Amino acid sequence: MSKKNTYPSKAPREKAFLVGVEIFGEEGLLPLNDSLDELALLADTAGLEVVGEITQKLSSPNAKTFIGAGKVNELKALAEDTLSQVVIFDDELSPRHQRELEKLLGENLRLLDRTSLILDIFAQHAKTREGMLQVELAQYEYYLPRLTRAWTHLARQAGGGGGRAGGVGGVGLRGPGETQLEVDRRVIRKRISHIKDELEKVRAHRMRHRDKRKKSRMPIVALVGYTNAGKSTLLNQLAQTDVYVADQLFATLDPTTRRVDLPGGYKSLFTDTVGFIQKLPTTLVAAFRATLEEIAEADLLLHVVDISHPNALNHFEAVEETLEDIDAAHIPVLTALNKIDLLSNQETAQETLENYPRAIAVSARKKIGIPELKKLLQKSLYETYTPILVRLPYQQGNLISIFHESGQIEKIEHERGGVMIQGRLPGRLVAQFDGWEILPEDQIPEEEI
């Protein structure tokens, strides 16, 4: 008889039960059901199995438990019936909501909200030291005001699974009384301060690299978009590289930069950045400041939209809001409507182009529209000029040189303390002159034209 090979079985996934709330008068970017569908995808990405969901419409959140008292009892019964180990709310819970719900749901149910779930996913996917530090900082700042039972969960997950959080400073973090909690908080604040210092070093290092790139005069394009829109796949097609790609939310966290050859012998640097999502935790936006500055310093943004998704326009608006939050809304944008190969009628993408600024329909996976996209990128970076009138102090010699080398000067006047230049600049360079009295063409006085 042949002996049967035996392999270790895969550990069963924890079962999760979802909770969604619709507040009258508060309209989210996504309808409640669609937002819960997205939460289910997040749970799946985190390694959880969704076994049910419950919803409630409220005029305002319950002061103690977010949902109504009767709904809490119903939730507990349903979670127990489905053998759930985790309950996930589709909103960020306040520390009080979390404490009260944990008491009522009991010790057998672990409580997460949308923010802590996203933090878990980031912790699992962060690979570089910078990414791990950013995630760890976001986790500490989120969990600090919630430092009770939730700490045991943080200790397991913080720092990308490295286990650093569980014994910071050699101090136990599960003391029974208020005094121990104060000790815990002091240790965590010290760790937060240390991480911020480390990230400032990372930020300074990135700034030096950006300065080098600017001196090379090679334009920088930042790929932005909702998570899982296909940015990494598109970068692979543009640069002919093999950036990691996975069909899941937040597959890549750390920015990746590649050189892309454009028509006419032109070149550009393309940076793939972390995907956005609705209700993106503010702690993450703050923690990933050094990474998100890669977007704010770009010459052009390539906004990738999954046009096959039923909520494509909502996703687009969510990204636009985040770009405003990180002060990147002033940068010129091209829109790539991706995944047209998944549409039953590809003409649908062409018909919706007018809903998006400077848009082109492509399929990164099927290589549809890639040559046309490259031509549009080359034109935007090297051929599209913006009329400006700018007054620069002589100390800004670098900007004056950029105007002479890359712009079209129509009028120049040397004044006391500075120089006034009127002319045209490639759109990708205009952002560098922000703050130096840039005037759009329709605002330039007639006598100066």
Image (cartoon, rainbow, N blue to C red):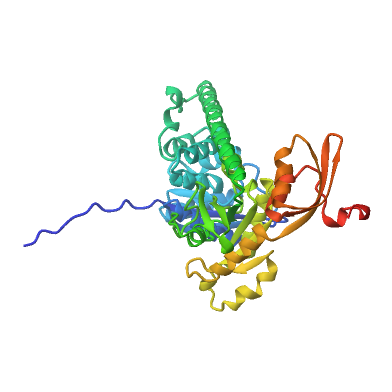
Viewer-nearest residue: 29 or 82:
29
Could one spot residue 330 in this view of the protein?
no
Who's the residue at 67% across and 55% down the image?
320
Q: Is residue 174 left or right of residue 406?
A: left
Total number of numbered discs in the rendering: 0
Could one spot residue 172 in this view of the protein?
yes
- The answer to whether 199 is drawn above or below residue 318 in the figure is above
Who's the residue at 65% across and 66% down the image?
359
Image quadrant in which the C terminus is located: bottom right
Q: Position of residue 255 (x, y in %)?
A: 52, 47
Viewer-nearest residue: 332 or 198:
332
- The answer to whether 84 is drawn above or below residue 399 in the figure is below
Q: Is residue 13 left or right of residue 341?
A: left
Who's the residue at 55% across and 70% down the image?
369
Viewer-nearest residue: 129 or 47:
129
Q: Position of residue 290 (x, y in %)?
A: 58, 40
Q: Quadrant of residue 285?
A: top right
Q: Is residue 68 left or right of residue 433?
A: left
Q: Position of residue 19 (x, y in %)?
A: 55, 53
Q: Position of residue 62 (x, y in %)?
A: 65, 46
Image quadrant in which the N terminus is located: bottom left
Viewer-nearest residue: 118 or 328:
328
In the orientation shown, which residue stands out farthest toward the left? 1
